Image: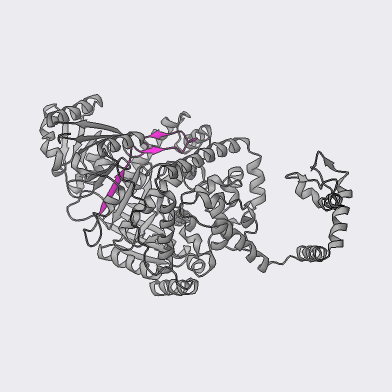
Amino acid sequence: MNREAFLQRVRQAVAEGNRAGAIADLPVRGGVGYQGAGPNPVQRFCDELRGAGGVPHIATGREAAVQAVLGLVRSKRSRNIMLGRGGAIERLDLAERLRAEGLLVKQMDDLSAQTARDSFFDADLGISNVAYLVAETGTVVMATQPDDPRSLSLLPPVHIAIAERRQILPDLFDLFDLFSPVSGTPPSCLTLITGPSKTGDIELKLVTGVHGPGEIHVLILDTSPT
Amino acid sequence: MNYARHEHHDFLGGSAHALADAGLQRVLTRLTDTLVAANRRGYAALSDSDKLRDHAKLIKEHTLAHLDRYLEQLEDSVKKLGGHVHWAATAEDARQIVVQIARQANCTKAVKSKSMTSEEMHLNPALEKAGIEVTETDFGEFIIQAAGERPSHLVAPAVHHTRESVAAILSRHLGEQLSDDPQALALTGRRVLRERFYQADLGITGANFAVAETGTIVLVTNEGNGRLTTTCPRVHVALMGLEKVIPRFGDLPVFLKLLARAATGQTLSIYTTLITGPRRDGELDGPEEFHLVILDNGRSKILATPFRESLQCIRCGACLNVCPVYRRVGGHAYGGVYSGPIGSILTPLYDSVSQNPHLPHASSLCGACQAACPVRINIPHMLIGLRELQHQFKPGRWESLAYGFWKQVLCRPWMYRLALKGARMFTRFFAKEGWLSRLPGPGANWTAMRDFPAPAAKAFRDRWKELNS
């Protein structure tokens, strides 16, 4: 409607305000800002996650990983669990193992767009795969797709993310380099999670779980020989 | 401009009020001390924060120098994803656009995550007038909305309240008696707001960044309300000032690595949400419609002037925390939507230089703001520029007479010496231990607020003469 007039005003303002030799090309970053993860990315990830208030767990075998998840679920006394699909969750056969405990487990193929909302609002624990982990910042990266909806890591009050060691990226730049119109359009929603939901709105006193999960656990399956 | 016309504000009155409020002074000191330390720690944790900040500034400079091109590219990218782009020249346009979107999609219940742009637009009253219920979902903003106030800090909007006053505000708002324990209050907020999210059909957010190349908008929050706002309702409207566009997806980490560190010392905020178009086929949640509203509201005017640099601001709030003026008077004294040093520039520019005469002077020009800024905006330089503009607008008869006289004195050494001698003799009667704490006549205006150093008993000139004789 006002598009042309709007852009014309911007065009004119740009021309008027540009100094001679205004930065014609995007500056080249080179290595500026790249922090990396140091010699031990797993350790770095765990330290950063802990610093942000999350809880890392490392399992060196599949059964140990399953036991870690079951232990957490028991300690939270969770009954109503939303479980992601594919990836590490599939390889650990978590759906079967959780159901064997007598828990109510819903996976994404049990849901439709109509029923998903109520299920997610009612759940008391969400277990998801991750797209990546970023060691530099202790960040869990969730990429939305049919098996990984936005709500899975958002609505239940406790989130358990299951990752494999090879999914760790050293630096935030490494993550963003993976997406561009050339290398692959980003998903409809890419979420970087760095710790549990927090607010300091009352007298700067840190309170967790005000909107998102108040607890985030990241289980790293590390089966590689060290 | 219709930026804040109805709230032209008495900065001096607001400041005096804030200075007299002992509770507010305590809160401000704690807030700003905490965040200043966090800002320094945040930068120090990066191996090359100086270079990264320089690079961030270069990206912003480049983008603003080619802003027309990048805005068109952004529009293309959003449309390719099936989203809609709306151009709003003024705040009034933007309000109408949002109301129109809501009506066309039959939305009646809106949830909002914190957006300074929506504050600037005065969006909430317009939506409510159109019969749309609006809930602020950032916990601090929720408190502010219940109290009927405006935010007092860019990242800590309710910081001027104590736990007791928050408990009183929310108890009244929700009609139940709440304890003043922050954790319990926050969980009450969670329960109430969850219900609103469940029912909402319209989600309104700002945008910390918008990527031209991919059509991605970025939301940075700590609570997760930005995520809920873009997950639960079936329509998502994102509001952005035209300066928020950046060229490439790969430029984002440059800003993300700086933004949270500058604001709160975090390596990253808890949630960084990158939204690229509406829900796609087969996905279980997320909005079916995505609208991006791009707001000018005076920004293009600034783009053409030497004040362009102010459009590089990424709204971290670091300049507020370090500012010796903000640290004492807090956010409300500034009157506008944006407070602190950056607000002292933006409010006069967006609104009117002549109607906001005190703001460019609400600074000691110490430079702490520029030193803390993640994109190194030369705020002191621009404040001086605004003072120059004011001078052009309003010569002020008595002021120019006084300065004319002073100029004559300064041009004649004998007159200068005579004037100083007179001042020394006159002030001798008022000086105590080298300070003048009470002056008569117009001088009282100065000494009401602070002491004035008394002239030395003997002029430096005379002592120099004695030494050399």
Residue B84 x %, y %: 31, 64
| Above or below for B414 versus B176 | below
- Residue B313 in view: yes
Image location of residue B408, percent across then percent down: 82, 66
Q: Quadrant of residue A183?
A: bottom left
Picture layout, residue B237 above or below residue A74: below
Place of residue B41 in the rendered image (x, y in percent of width and height, measured from the top left): 45, 40
Q: Is residue B424 above or below residue A98?
A: below
Looking at the image, which is closer to me, B72 or A169?
A: A169
**Does the magenta portion include B209?**
no
Q: Nearer the viewer, residue B281 or B153?
A: B153
Q: Position of residue B446 (x, y in %)?
A: 76, 49
- Whether residue A103 appears in this view of the structure is no
Q: Which of the pair B211/B288 is nearer the observer?
A: B211
Which stretch is magenta?
A188-211
Q: In the drawing, does residue B397 fall left or right of residue A84?
A: right
Residue A204 sits inside the magenta stretch: yes
Which of the colour schemes (rainbow, by chain, secondary structure, one colour) is used? Answer: one colour
| Residue under the point 40% across and 58% down | B239
Image position of A103 (left or right of B452): left
- Seen in the picture, residue A216 relative to B144 is either above or below; the reply is above
How many numbered discs, if any? 0
Name the quadrant of the N terminus of chain B. bottom right
Residue at (44, 45) in percent of width and height: B43
Residue A30 lies in quadrant:
bottom left
Residue occupying the far front of the picture: B469
Which residue is at the front of the view, B279 or B51? B51
Q: Is residue B33 left or right of residue B250?
A: right
Give the main secondary structure, helix, strand or loop, of the magenta stretch.
Answer: loop
Q: Is residue B194 left or right of residue B340?
A: left
